Image (cartoon, rainbow, N blue to C red):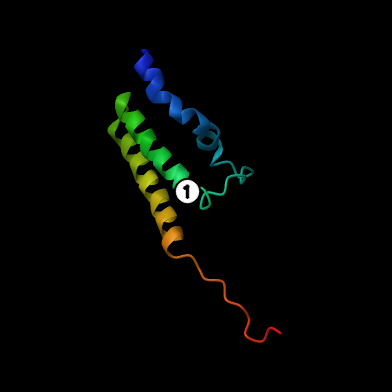
Amino acid sequence: MTVVDYLVLAPLIPFLPIIATWWLPWEQWFPMAKYSHIFGPAMLYGAFVAWYFEAEWWAVLVFVFFGLAVLAVAVWAFLYKPSIQQPENEP
């Protein structure tokens, strides 16, 4: 691997524990909806890394699909925040 390869791969290192353990039933420590604005672009960057290292086409599409889905959750959460309504009979 060249220096450029390491530079392309380095930004994904902080996300490796999340990517490696998201499917485990006892690993609910990462609130996906709360940090989707960070994790979505990271998955799209993972698609770029997969393409850069010449992964299979379906692996790149999986990263793109999940990255766009997580970004859609982030945009939806930003645009459609439920308003907190105060009870009417409060003294």
Which residue: 57% across, 76% down? 85
Q: Position of residue 1 (x, y in %)?
A: 37, 13
- The relative height of residue 5 versus residue 67 in the rendered view (above or below) is above
Q: Which residue is mark 1?
A: 36
Which residue: 61% across, 78% down? 86
Within-10-Å neighbours for mark 1: few <14, some 14–19, many 20+: many
Q: Position of residue 24 (x, y in %)?
A: 58, 41
Q: Position of residue 27 (x, y in %)?
A: 62, 42
Taking the view exactly as shown, the residue that stands out farthest to the front is: 91
How many marks on residues?
1
Which residue: 56% across, 71% down? 84
In this view, the residue in front, 21 or 87, is: 87
- Residue type at tag 1: Ser
Residue 23 in which image quadrant: top right
Q: Position of residue 40 (x, y in %)?
A: 42, 44
- The relative height of residue 18 versus residue 32 in the rendered view (above or below) is above
Which residue: 50% across, 34% down? 15
Which element type, helix, strand or loop, lies under badge 1?
helix
Residue 2 in which image quadrant: top left
Residue 3 in which image quadrant: top left
Q: Quadrant of the C terminus?
A: bottom right
Taking the view exactly as shown, the residue that stands out farthest to the top is: 2
In-image side of 83 versus 42 (left or right): right
Taking the view exactly as shown, the residue that stands out farthest to the bottom is: 89
- The relative height of residue 75 versus residue 40 in the rendered view (above or below) is below
